[in-house]
Amino acid sequence: MGLGSELLKSILHPAEIAAMLKLKYGGYIPKTMSSRKIPVRMMEGRDFCYTILNRVSRSFALVIQQLPWELRDPICIFYLVLRGLDTVEDDMKLDMKTKAPLLTNFHEIIEKDGWNMKGIGDTPDYVLLMEQFHKVISEFKRLKKPYQAAIKLITKKMGKGMCDFAEKMGVDSLEEWDLYCHYVAGLVGHGLSALFSASGLEKKSLAAELEISNTMGLFLQKTNIIRDYLEDLEEGRIFWPKAVWSKWSKHLSQFADRPHDRKSLACLNELVTNALAHIPGCLKYMRMIEDPMNFRFCAIPQVMAIATLSEVYNNPKVFKGVVKIRKGLSCRIILETEDFGTVRDYFRYFLNDIKSRIPRSDPSATLTLKRVDTALRLLSAGGG
């Protein structure tokens, strides 16, 4: 969708229009070699890594610019290594005899000079990443040893977890949902805390804060899973926990046929309510981050997540397409999230928005209200 269409969406929000224009034309987005018409596959080293990062995740490529220089390369490589692992997991053409050893040994693969894999990936950019993965490996091996160790450990744990879930057709219990989200996102939180600590920019003790590091990842991952209901369904992936959706329907796909039905919305709202339980831990973690640039890197995705939960809550459009917040609002969040004060303001706004729309008849209404009020009290008390 072009800039003109996004500007129209924000026509009633002039601050969002200003933010979009400022982010696009104000020098906030760094120029890559691809903007100078050099083919990506011809690039080497850091140029390749940052350009392919922009291809596979523009949002993360932008957020990573918030980091101090000491951490940009380690976290860029960390993300690309995990994206490579995720590409293996997602490729439905690979049988388990091929996929399982790749997942469980990927932490060793990232130390093999020259390793790459052709013909894998569900988009041209992911195919290119895997075809040129030896360039990521070269940059990984240039990192300081503590950074390499942290990345390798998380890759090992995540690969094992992905392998455990690879043959399952879905997630059954809420405990299993938490475990899946831990493997694919909570472990990212563990890794980031380890990298922050290794940099010397945060306290060494942060690496030991495993529970709230995990919570940061779960909050983001559950938000994405809730939002991506239809997209995942169409691709044959089921990440909504059966323990919840089976209370309201015999088949998960039936919600798409009855998006306005009270049962469809009851299921959606129960999952949003589940995700809200992670807010206290997220607030506590963000309060522990001392470096202002690290704080922005951590806080921006969390604010995006609460904004997205507010957008999807009790919204039948979730069952007909991917519901996203306005690009203008995303730009405002990126530009304005500077400290815990702005995080507190944004969280209050979106929590109160959810609170104002809780249907009295919704089966989760009481618990939703309780979790919203708990988060609002923590914000008033200073963030948990």
Image (spheres, rainbow, N blue to C red):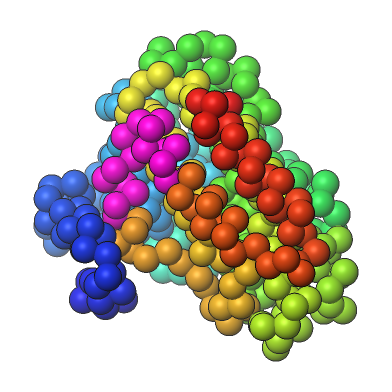
| Left or right of 252 in this view: 304 | left
Against 26, is 200 above or below?
Answer: above
Quadrant housing residue 104? top right
- What residue do we see at 24% from left, 50% from top? 43
Any part of residue 235 in sight? no
Against 207, is 89 above or below?
Answer: below
Which sits in the foreground, 328 or 44?
Answer: 328
Quarter the C terminus occupies: top right
Q: Is residue 349 magenta?
A: no
The image position of residue 23, as x and y in percent, is: 20, 53
Task: Identify the magenta region.
Answer: 331-347
- What residue do we see at 60% from left, 39% from top? 375
Which sits in the foreground, 132 or 70?
Answer: 70
Quadrant housing residue 46? top left
| Left or right of 234 in this view: 367 | right
- What residue do we see at 61% from left, 77% from top? 316
